[in-house]
Amino acid sequence: MNIAHIRTRSGKDFDPADPKPESIDPRDIAWSLGRLPRFVGHTSAATPLSVAQHSTAVADEAHAMLGKQRPEMVTTCRLHALLHDASEAYTGDIPSPIKRLLGARILVIETKIQEAIYEAIGPRARLLAGELAMVMDTVRHADEAVLKAEMAVLLGEAPDDLIDVEPMLAEYHDLRAPLTASHATVGYYLALRQAVNAATGDDIGDLVPEGGALAPIGGAA
């Protein structure tokens, strides 16, 4: 094993200095995000809120935001929302205060990884520049809305512009009782598989291939 690489759950060697699309497996992303806690685990719930559950909530919120304006773009928007934190499957969920200390370097690393993920899954090529801008802006607003709900429910820090948290709880899978890692992983992967298929026509396969072991797409268990 190369200590400069990350060995993923599926057995791939991921080079964070030079991420390649062929080293990206959606199963690895789902597996990692389902076990990765938001807010470095400093939340009030007994079960940590995972990045996978957060990403699924952002996809639902983005769908609600864009559905009435541009329903034809909802499927691609859901895919981008599900992938908006996908690089964290390889970097971890780095808290914003730490990112500020690290400066531009961490943003470069995250951007390169995100680009490799997008190239592996392919949603960007199916949008015009103006449509992509609208989708990414919707995802950003959805991410902010979900963050505010998470802060209010799990950190006890209600932002000034969050008037009523209660209607948001059902939408976001009841943040008071976050999903277990296994349930978050499966829920995220099923949403991702559906979104990829709807947006691109591709099928990324089952989360657990035949044989019962997590394996690379098209690879052996």
Image (cartoon, rainbow, N blue to C red):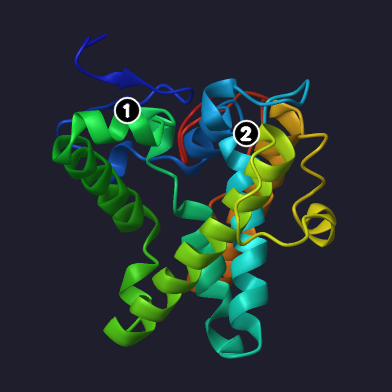
Residue at (29, 34) in percent of width and height: 99
Name the residue beneath numbered marker 1.
Answer: 98
The earlier-in-sequence mark between 1 and 2 is: 2
Q: Nearer the viewer, residue 49 or 16?
A: 49
Left or right? Give the position of 103 relative to 173: left
Left or right? Give the position of 7 relative to 42: left
Quadrant location of residue 184? top right
Name the residue beneath numbered marker 2.
Answer: 50
Q: Identify whether 189 is placed above or below 99.
A: below
Pinpoint residue 44: horizontal percent, then vertical percent.
73, 25
Q: Amino acid at mark 2?
A: Ser
Pinpoint residue 48: horizontal percent, then vertical percent.
68, 25
Q: Quadrant of the N terminus?
A: top left
Q: Are marks 1 and 2 in contact (CB under 8 Å)?
A: no
Q: Nearer the viewer, residue 177 or 127?
A: 177
Q: Amino acid at mark 1?
A: Ile
Pinpoint residue 211: horizontal percent, then vertical percent.
66, 26
